[in-house]
Image (spheres, rainbow, N blue to C red):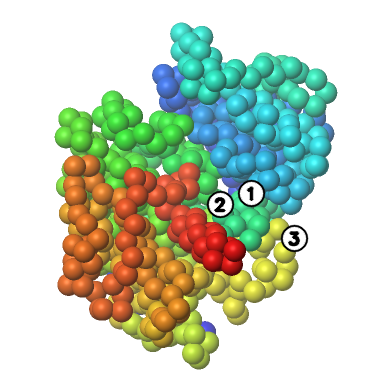
Amino acid sequence: MTNDKKWIVHYPDEVSVSIGQEFKSLQSYLREAAEKHPEKVALHFMGKEMTYQEVYQEALRFAYQLQRLGVEKGDRVAIMLPNTPQSVICYYGALFAGAVVVQTNPLYVEREIEHQMKDSGAKVIVCLDLLFPRVEKVRNRTNLEHVIVTGIKDYLPFPKNVIYPFIQKKEHGVVIKVKDDDYTHSFKTLLATGKEEIEEPPIDPKEDLALLQYTGGTTGPAKGVMLTHFNLVTNTRQCIHWSYKMKRGEERILGVLPFFHVYGMTIVMNFAIMHIAKMIILPKFQPKEVLKTIEKHRITLFPGAPTMYVGLINEPSISKYDLSSIEVCLSGSAPLPLEVQQKFEELSGGKLVEGYGLTETSPVAIATPIWGKRKEGSIGIPWPDTDAAILSPETEEEAKPGEIGELMVKGPQVMKGYWNLPEETNATFHDGWLLTGDMGYMDEDGYFYIVDRKKDMIIAGGFNIYPREIEEVLYEHEAIQEAAVIGVPDPYRGETVKAFVVLKEEKEVDEKELEDYCRKHLAAYKVPRIFEFRDELPKSMVGKILRRVLVEEEENKLKEQEIKEGS
């Protein structure tokens, strides 16, 4: 399959078609930062600051203790933490020890923790004290040999570290006390007794894994995506190259995207370390806290998710805050509504651009030029060294411009495969191209557009309907804050369109008004037949609206109805 890469002419002069290759381990960039800029502040967390030298030293001490506990090259070390200094130290420390990091969502329930630990074969897990009881319940059914426990208070300055346990008890009704034994260890104690002299195993960046990143598991158990040092190093370097106006050693990055998600890990944590930036870390997204942080720390780079920007522009107090320091916002993990993009740029004065990627691409493959040509509704153009094409469902050949098919990508950031799943790995590739599962098209200029997930497409009365198109229309309505569209069973049409909407504060609109509005902007067969008003929509930790949860709710309602009718 050939591709003439029409998009290259739209690269700004400062962006090269190829950035070359660096065959280095991911952790080597932390070492370089510490050696060249030891006193520079690497991170800020709730009043606590750490220099690059301090982060590097603590990562080495953690690596020393992992090796003392029996971790060898290639062993898996799970990290189940919110954004904290520990999440950075443990990530790089595990890599220094030669381990493969397994990022584990702190929201996981016991069943999900058990699956991930069993599937990855993780030998060690680092978890927050509040999560320790969950891990303990499944430990005996996994390969875990050691649990390392830490708390938010471990990295708080005085007097916050003294006060925090009382806040924790008030919020969660419990204070977890962990007793050290042969299997359970205090992170704080391990670091205090750790050494900085370690035997760092040799790394082959192209072959050796740095990360097992589990996908969301929307169609079954979560799969472990195998990402090498080369994959992650390259994608971070591509991001730095794309953001060419961001000055090395001078930027202040807001770290509110979770680091346990590959998007936050690459675009915030790895980017910051490699670019010698200062990370201002927040453990969770709260609109007012984010606005305060942007103003106080003069944030210049704010990677986020669309729902974060939605939450901020709808925060009543936003006008009280000075957001003028923001230069660039990179949006990912879900489609960015045009109205949200325009409003946030107007409020901040910075650039907000959309990127596209997958866990399988480390994660970014395509993005809108930050200081170049934009196209409304487009996800942009492939990054340097990256190729993209549309696979025609009819011919299984490359589709013509404007023709809808499945988006495929190829590049140095594409995964090695799925952990222990060779058949699924083979099924995900087509002649060396990664099949994304997203339906879209390329225009005459080489700009790409996503119409929807292949599996989210609704077929109603023989028509193909893409939820994203309807959601875009709903987002433009002045009363709607959030929207999600799914297909629900219909005896006549096969499926029909249902829309879930969250209204803005003090705004009102009824079902009939929304239907009339949609009829003005959509073909009749695309207009939602059912509207459901909600106070909130189910979201992932990254802020991505989870359509699959809504689909499952509808399926359960249908089953309950069938049971009632049957009885």
Give the amino acid at mark 1: Leu
The residue labelled by disc 2 is 232
Mark 1: give few (<14), some (14-19) or many (20+) Cα within 10 Å: many
Give the amino acid at mark 3: Asn
Q: Residue at x 23, y 67 (%)?
A: 515
* Residue 186 figure quarter: top right
Q: CA distance from mark 1 to mark 2?
A: 9 Å
Mark 3: give few (<14), some (14-19) or many (20+) Cα within 10 Å: some
Give the amino acid at mark 2: Leu
Task: Say which label, 2 or 3, has the lower sequence index.
Answer: 2
Image height of 42 relative to 395, above or below: above
Mark 2: give few (<14), some (14-19) or many (20+) Cα within 10 Å: many
Q: Position of residue 276 (x, y in %)?
A: 44, 36
**From where the camera sits, is residue 413 visible?**
no
Q: Count numbered badges in the picture.
A: 3
Asked if disc 2 and disc 3 are in contact, CB closer than 8 Å, the reply is no
* Residue 95 figure quarter: top right
Q: CA distance from mark 2 to mark 3?
A: 20 Å
Q: CA distance from mark 3 to mark 1?
A: 14 Å
Of badges 2 and 3, nearer the viewer stands 3
Q: Residue at x 54, y 20 (%)?
A: 173
Of badges 3 and 1, nearer the viewer stands 3
Q: For the residue labelled by badge 1, is the local secondary structure a helix, a strand or a loop? A: strand
Asked if disc 1 and disc 2 are in contact, CB closer than 8 Å, the reply is yes
Q: For the residue labelled by badge 2, is the local secondary structure a helix, a strand or a loop? A: helix
The residue labelled by disc 3 is 420
The residue labelled by disc 1 is 211
Residue lying farthest to the front in this orientation? 567
**From where the camera sits, is residue 30 visible?**
yes
Q: For the residue labelled by badge 3, is the local secondary structure a helix, a strand or a loop? A: loop
Residue lying farthest to the bottom in this orientation? 395
Task: Say which label, 1 or 2, has the lower sequence index.
Answer: 1
